[in-house]
Image (cartoon, rainbow, N blue to C red):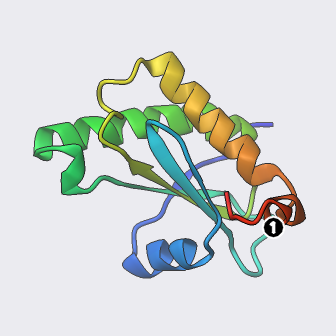
Amino acid sequence: MTVRLTRLKTRGDFLRVAAGRVRAVRPALVLQAAPRPGDEGAALRVGYTASRRVGNAVARNRAKRRLRAAAASVLARQGRAGTDYVLIARAGTGARPYAELLADLEGALHQLARPLSSRDARGGEG
């Protein structure tokens, strides 16, 4: 099932997703997720961010472009409706082969899809 992606734009939305403390870390990215209260059937929303640690402006923009392309490919098919996602670029995002970037995103999405109780049993979040 293909879901329409909508962009997260306000700082408050990014902070709400981060406060949910549900995340998966991969070599190319960090994926954070939080359900949108009261909007279970709505389109999923995605935000993208890259800090200066990723590199200069050119490197950050390249990393975010790659994350947008990966999200359009993976999250549109496998994302959960009514959920807000934030993709955070890491230092290797711009240079990582695209197939591995997609695999990182899919793996992070599968990790977040596991029931919360199984993450708590390991003693960690993600």
Asked if residue 36 lies left or right of residue 47, the reply is: right
In percent of width and height, residue 101 lies at 49, 28
In percent of width and height, residue 76 lies at 65, 39
Choose between 55 and 124: the one closer to the eye: 124
**Res 108 quadrant in image:** top right
Choose between 24 and 42: the one closer to the eye: 24
Identify which residue is drawn at 66% across, 34% down: 106
Quarter occupied by the N terminus: top right
In percent of width and height, residue 31 lies at 55, 52
- Dot 1 corresponds to which residue? 120
- Mark 1: few/some/many CA within 10 Å (<14, 14-19, 20+): few
In percent of width and height, residue 25 lies at 54, 48
Number of numbered callouts drawn: 1
Identify which residue is drawn at 25% across, 35% down: 62
Residue at disc 1, secondary structure: helix
Note whether residue 100 is visible.
yes
Note whether residue 79 is visible.
no
Is residue 55 depicted above or below 9 in this figure?
above
Asked if residue 96 lies left or right of residue 22, the reply is: left
Asked if residue 92 lies left or right of residue 100, the reply is: left
Choose between 4 and 94: the one closer to the eye: 94
Q: Outermost residue toward the front?
A: 123
Identify which residue is drawn at 46% across, 43% down: 29
**Res 60 quadrant in image:** top left
Quarter occupied by the C terminus: bottom right
Residue type at numbered disc 1: Asp
Is residue 4 depicted above or below 122 in this figure?
above
Choose between 42 and 94: the one closer to the eye: 94
Is residue 73 depicted above or below 110 in this figure?
above
Identify which residue is drawn at 37% across, 46% down: 89
